[in-house]
Image (tube, rainbow, N blue to C red):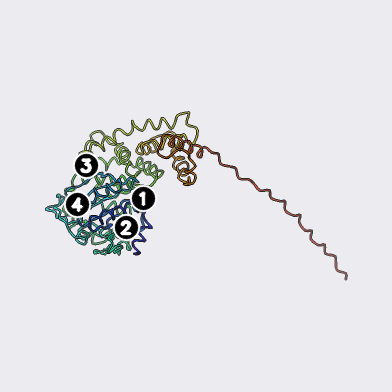
Amino acid sequence: MSDYIYMLESHLSPDQNRAVEDTQAAAGLANVNVFLTGGAMRDMLAGFRIRDLDFVVEGNALKIAKAICERSGATTVSTDENRKTAELVFPSGVTAQIAMSRQDKYARAGAKPQVSPATIQEDLRGRDFTCNAIALSLNRASRGLLLDPMNGLADIERKELRAVSTYGFYDDPSRLLRLVRYRVRMGYTVEERTQMQVANAREAEVEKHIPARALGDELKRISGEDSPTEIFKGLEEAGLLALFSPALSAKLNLHGLARYEKAIRVLPDDARWRATRFGTFLYCLTEKLTPKDRQALMKATEMPKSDIDQWQKIEARAKKLEAALRAPKVRKPSHVYHIVVAAAPEDVLFVLYHSALKPVQERLRNHFQKYAVTVQEITPEEWATIEPKPGTPKYAKAREEFISEILNRKPKKPVEEEVPPPPPPVPEPVMGRRGR
C-alpha cells in the first residue's frame, strides 16, 4: 500500500473512508479516472483534520455524482452546470465535491469562466494556491500516486501560501478573500512574490469585480471557520471588509463574535454541525446593523431567500427550545438529552449563543460534555440487550428508556479500602556514657 494511501486512511474518519470507497467504485464502473484533490489533500499533508472531500474526475462529473448517490444514498445539495461540479452530502453527514477536471479561461476580471475538459495535470496548474494544487490518484493502476506539478508539498512544509499563477487574482479576484481566510485558519505566511501579486491586483482594483454571489459564498465559508473574528480583522486590514457591507467596518460585533466562537466550541466538530452555523452567524454579525445596513448586506451578497429565512426566523424558532430546557419538570440528565437530540442543530447553537439563562447554558454544556459522551460509549453488546426488533416503534421506545436508565444512573461511590494503621515506631537504642 502507498504511504500516501495509508496516510489518507489514517486521517479520514470511518464515514469519510466509506465515502472515498463509494466514489472510487462509481468512477471505476464508469471507467473514468478519479483523484482526491484540493482542501482534502492540503489538510492531510499539513496535518489538519480533513473537513470535506474534494474529488476530480477526468470525465462526466455530474454523471459520476448521480452514480455515487444511487450507490450510497448521498444527496445532491447543489450543482454548477458551467463548471460541471456537484456538492454531495452522504447519509453519515460527510460532505464532498465531485468536479470535472477542467481548464477555466476568463475574458476579464471576475467574469464567468469559459470551461473546457482537461487532464488532471492541467486542472492542477489552473488552481488558486499551490497547497491546493495537489492530487492523489484513486485509480486501480496508479492508486496512491501523488501529483504535485506546482511543488505545493514544499510550500506546505514551509507553511507558505503561494499563488499558482501570476494573473490568478486578476482572473478570479475572490481569491483575495480566500487568501485572508487561509492565512488565518492555517497560520501560514504569504510568500513574498504572492504579496507583490496581491499589491498589483489591488492597485488595479480587481476586488471591485468580485461577483456578489462569490461574496455570499465566502461569507458562508467564514461562518464555518473557528476564528471568524480574526478573519474579519484580516479583511478589514486588507481593506476588503467593506465589500460585504460598508457598515461592517464601523459596526463589527466583536463582543458578539467572541460569544459565537465560545458557543461553537461546545458543539461537535463535524460537517453536520458546521453546516448549521449560518443562521446564528448572520444574526450575530448583523446585531448592530440598522435595517438599511442589513438590506445592503443581502444585496451585496445576493443572499438567497432560504438563508435570509434561516437567519431572520431563527430567534423565534429557538425560543421553544429555550423554554423546554428551562421548564421545571426538566430535572434529570435524560430529560435534557432527549430534548436536545430532538431539536434542530441550528436552534441548539442559537440558544447557546443567545440565551442569558444560566440553567439553560449549563444544561446544554452538560449534554455535549457529559450525556452525549456517555451515550456514545455504550457498547454494541449493551445495545444488543434491548429486546424489541430494531426499526420497530417498540424498539425506539425501549431504546429511549435504555438511554434514560444509563444517563440517570447515579455513579457508584468508590469503595475505600481500609488502610491498616502504620506500625509503631521502633524505639531508638539508648547509648550509655563511656567511662574515663
Left or right: where 115 falls relative to 389: left
Looking at the picture, which amino acid does disc 1 mark? Asp
Q: Quadrant of residue 354?
A: top left
Looking at the picture, which amino acid does disc 3 mark? Thr
Q: CA distance from mark 3 to mark 4?
A: 15 Å
Q: Which of these two is toward me, 129 or 412?
A: 412
**Pointers 2 and 4 in contact (C-beta within 8 Å):** no
Q: CA distance from mark 2 to mark 3?
A: 28 Å
Q: CA distance from mark 1 to mark 2?
A: 29 Å
Looking at the picture, which amino acid does disc 4 mark? Pro
Can residue 242 be seen in this snapshot? no
Q: Which of these two is toward me, 398 or 344?
A: 398
Counting from the top left corner in percent of width and height, residue 279 is at 31, 38
Give the secondary structure at mark 1: helix
The label on residue 15 is 1
Residue at image mark 4: 173
Residue at image mark 3: 301
Residue at image mark 2: 188
41 vs 92: above or below: below
Q: Quadrant of residue 247?
A: top left
Q: CA distance from mark 3 to mark 1?
A: 33 Å
Q: Earlier in the sequence, mark 2 or mark 3?
A: 2
